[in-house]
Image: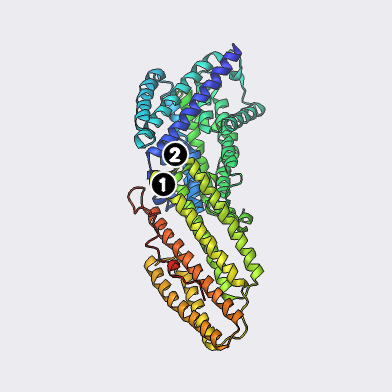
Amino acid sequence: MIFQMVFMFAGGVALFLLGMKLLTDGMKIAAGNTLRNMLAKYTSTMAKGIAAGIVITALVQSSSAIIFATIGFVNAGLMSLLQAVYVILGSNVGTTLTGWIVATVGFNVNLQQLAMPVLAVGMLLWLVYGTDKKGALGQALVGFALFFMGIDVLKNTFEGLGEIVPFDQVGHDLPSMLLMLLIGILLTTLMQSSSAAIAVVLTAVAAGLVPVHAAAALVIGADVGTTSTALFAVLGATSNAKRAAIAHVLFNLLKVPVAFPFIGIILSGIYFVFGEGTSTPVVIAIFHTTIKLIGLFIFLPFTSKIVNYLNSKFTEEERKPETTRYLDDTVLHTPSLAVSALIFELKRVGRKTRKLIRSTLKGKRPAKEIEQGGKGVEELAFTVGEYIQKMQQIGIPNDMEIVLPQSLRVLQYFSEARGHAIIASKIPRAASLPGSVNTTIEILEELMRSFMKITDSEKSGFSVSQIREMVQQMESSYEIAKNAILQAGSKGDISIQQMVDLHEQIRNYRRIWDQLSKAAYYLDQFNQLIEHEPGTGPQLQESETDQPTAEKQENVTV
């Protein structure tokens, strides 16, 4: 009998968790870029951020999914940490809707009659339409049906469990209440879902297995336990992800000193307002929402100070040149965010590459130091490349799939530009050169410094046409410098070795701007891509024929 109930309980929880996962995943795909746009557009103020967190979490039915997506926005540079914390606070309130659904629908209707038609319609849509939006909606409906079937199994299990487990005898004393708190923490930690833990608590209290005061302690414990999900998820993640996770943890830990000592007072207030005849599941749902709101109003005045404090933490990883700033596994939960974060990380590789090249042009850093710096950037680029492979494995929308090979192409362009810069830094340059030679090389290097600025795709006014014009200027300057070097060599003003070295140096310069201009071409397309919804913006091109490159014109002989 006991083993049968244990298996029934485990099966009910499994159905509930599976339903939640299918519902969440289906809604994220069915909503397309709507969730991404809502987070991007409606988080500019505290009120908007909190409201967005509440509404989107209520829609998706997973605070963890929204928190991960929010962390992804911070990583992708589309949202500040302060905005993200507001969304996280709202998401914590929005997740209480699950409890309301269970408390109001789960015990007042025939769940089998509700679930079966929904399951049939959802499965039909899923089978017919597959992975497109209609199919994803079908997947969400299947998850919704399994959600209620799990609740039904839990209800039937708890009806017979009261005779075996004497939870109804839990007293109001501190040791008993602390035990309930710990059980709530354990439930969420094991299930990795506070919504599942709350559903278990609500079905237990509806069956009379757990008294209302003990259920309230279990709910607080479930909220505390949900912090483990965030902490597990950000192990090895970016600094921004860790900061956002800590804010989530602090908010939920706040419930212990704020709500736990006052459980009796809060419950008395609920009964006073809503009446003694209010059903215990509804009372617990009200209690859950109430403590979330209390925590929200206490936390809000200190949000800015907490964010400032968190911004000063986890900075060690950011200082490492090979550590990604925008990419981690949390971003992979939302493919469109992963694409945005990837593009921001590519731009970061570009910034580091241009900085290295500028050091080469100044000629003030030793060649060994420049080479060492190049290795750090190369390690970062390698990490980004590995992440692109992860993105390919999880899959991204078809209209954005071309971003992955093109991103690898951009990484290769940056790598080759760094390689030519390092080669140029090692070429010896005479302290004094004929005036014509020295002047032409200095003009070429000055043009390249200007070129470094206009190839920065993050600056306003970035334009591929402007890059093309600059490439033409540098081509002319390159030819003038090459002729000056050859004439100086033919007249004996410089040695043949100096002539070869100088030509090799400016030829490496030419290859640098060739690679950077190619990279800029694709980054320009990426900029246009992330500014539009999938399918509505310009399409990425495979061809390089329109790129501002002079590689085909190069004559590599002296």
Q: Nearer the viewer, residue 525 or 266?
A: 525
Q: Residue 365's x, y, as percent?
A: 63, 73
Q: Is residue 446 visible?
A: yes
Dot 2 corresponds to which residue?
A: 57
* Residue sitting at x 61%, y 46%: 236
Q: How is this picture coloured?
A: rainbow
Which mark identifies residue 535? Answer: none
* Residue sitting at x 45%, y 31%: 22
Reply above or below: 261 against 410: above
Mark 1 crowd level (few <14, some 14–19, many ≥20, 10 Å Cα): some
Q: Amino acid at mark 2?
A: Thr
Q: How many numbered marks, from 0 up?
A: 2
Q: Residue 406's x, y, as percent?
A: 45, 53
Most distant residue in the top direction: 1
User: From the viewer's perspective, is the residue at label 2 or at label 1 nearer?
Assistant: 1
Mark 2 crowd level (few <14, some 14–19, many ≥20, 10 Å Cα): many
Q: Amino acid at mark 1?
A: Arg
Dot 1 corresponds to which residue?
A: 36
* Residue sitting at x 45%, y 26%: 147
